[in-house]
Image (tube, rainbow, N blue to C red):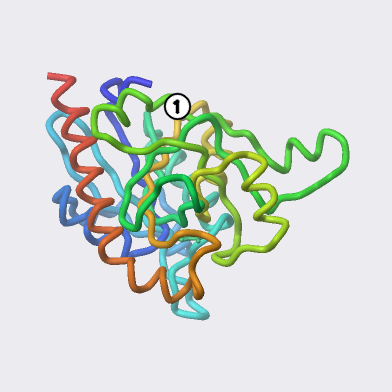
């Protein structure tokens, strides 16, 4: 993938608190996109960045529990709404992730997805459904970008839990996964139907399997991770714009 090929880019972020530093860093402004269904509560931001159109969408807040709508169902809905509303050339799934132990990751590192996106908890051990369950959604080759900015790359896997089951762990090991999170495969599953590439940019809040309490680790490392995430996105997009001029 050449990052400079893309003129209209949609950044999809699950949590409002993940999005805030990105909005500030890129100088994005709240925008109203009439095509978005108001019932969904998605938030939309936009800015011109050199000659690029950058949009950012969040999934919004769950009305019943007053929390961010994370995980795969909101991610798939946001992806479809984004595609129908603005038809982006590229989607960036930006957010936090748990790094898998012994992969050389540290808290606050930002990494890019490689090879394919997959689900580690959609287990259907029955014929071809097994492969369907894993997903194997296509992932653009971001090796050059990673090299240029010294970012780690590896398989990013999606599941609907912050915590880890033994079965999840087995699948993560089998696929040599670098980081686990809760959205990118769902976004890529939808985007693949429209041939839109999805780049995963994920900042590490915790090292999976090592932490005593994943929710606590996630909270205490959240700010440093999202700050690094926003800076990396700005660097990538500035690079993208420079390459176009
Ligand atoms: N986001 C940050 N850490 C995570 C983890 N361990 N699992 C899923 N999503 C995450």
Q: Is residue 80 visible?
A: no
- Position of 136 with respect to 207 (left or right) is right
Quarter occupied by the C terminus? top left
Q: Quadrant of residue 90?
A: top left
- Position of 13 with respect to 171 (left or right) is left
Q: Residue at x 21, y 55 (%)?
A: 23
Q: Residue at x 20, y 31 (%)?
A: 52
Q: Using the image, determine if residue 218 lies above or below residue 85.
A: below
Q: Residue at x 76, y 49 (%)?
A: 123
Give the tally of numbered discs: 1
Q: Residues within 10 Å of mark 1 (few under 14, many from 20)?
A: some
Q: Is mark 1 within 8 Å of ligand 1?
A: no
Residue denoted by label 1: 140
Quarter occupied by the N terminus? top left
- Position of 128 with respect to 59 (left or right) is right
Residue 148, image x and y in percent? 24, 27
Residue 80, image x and y in percent? 51, 44
Residue 130, image x and y in percent? 79, 40
Q: Is residue 194 visible?
A: yes
- Position of 124 with respect to 186 (left or right) is right
The single residue placed furthest to the right in the displayed view is: 126
SS type, badge 1: loop
The single residue placed furthest to the bottom in the displayed view is: 65
């Amino acid at each position: 993938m050449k990052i400079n090929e893309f003129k209209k880019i949609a950044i999809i972020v699950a949590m409002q608190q993940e999005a805030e530093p990105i909005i500030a860093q890129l100088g994005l402004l709240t925008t109203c996109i009439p095509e978005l269904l108001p019932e969904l509560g998605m938030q939309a931001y936009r800015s011109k960045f050199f000659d690029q159109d950058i949009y950012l969408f969040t999934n919004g807040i769950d009305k019943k529990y007053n929390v961010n709508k994370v995980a795969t169902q909101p991610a798939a809905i946001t992806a479809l709404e984004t595609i129908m509303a603005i038809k982006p050339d590229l989607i960036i799934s930006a957010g936090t992730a748990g790094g898998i132990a012994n992969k050389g990751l540290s808290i606050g590192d930002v990494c890019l997805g490689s090879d394919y996106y997959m689900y580690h908890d959609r287990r259907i051990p029955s014929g071809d459904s097994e492969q369907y369950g894993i997903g194997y959604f296509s992932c653009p080759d971001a090796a050059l970008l990673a090299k240029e900015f010294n970012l780690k790359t590896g398989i990013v896997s999606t599941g609907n839990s912050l915590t880890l089951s033994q079965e999840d762990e087995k699948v993560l090991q089998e696929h040599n996964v670098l980081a686990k999170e809760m959205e990118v495969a769902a976004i890529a599953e939808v985007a693949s139907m429209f041939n839109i590439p999805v780049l995963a940019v994920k900042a590490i809040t915790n090292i999976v399997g090592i932490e005593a309490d994943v929710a606590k680790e996630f909270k205490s490392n959240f700010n440093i991770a999202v700050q690094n995430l926003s800076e990396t996105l700005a660097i990538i997009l500035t690079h993208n714009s420079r390459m176009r001029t």
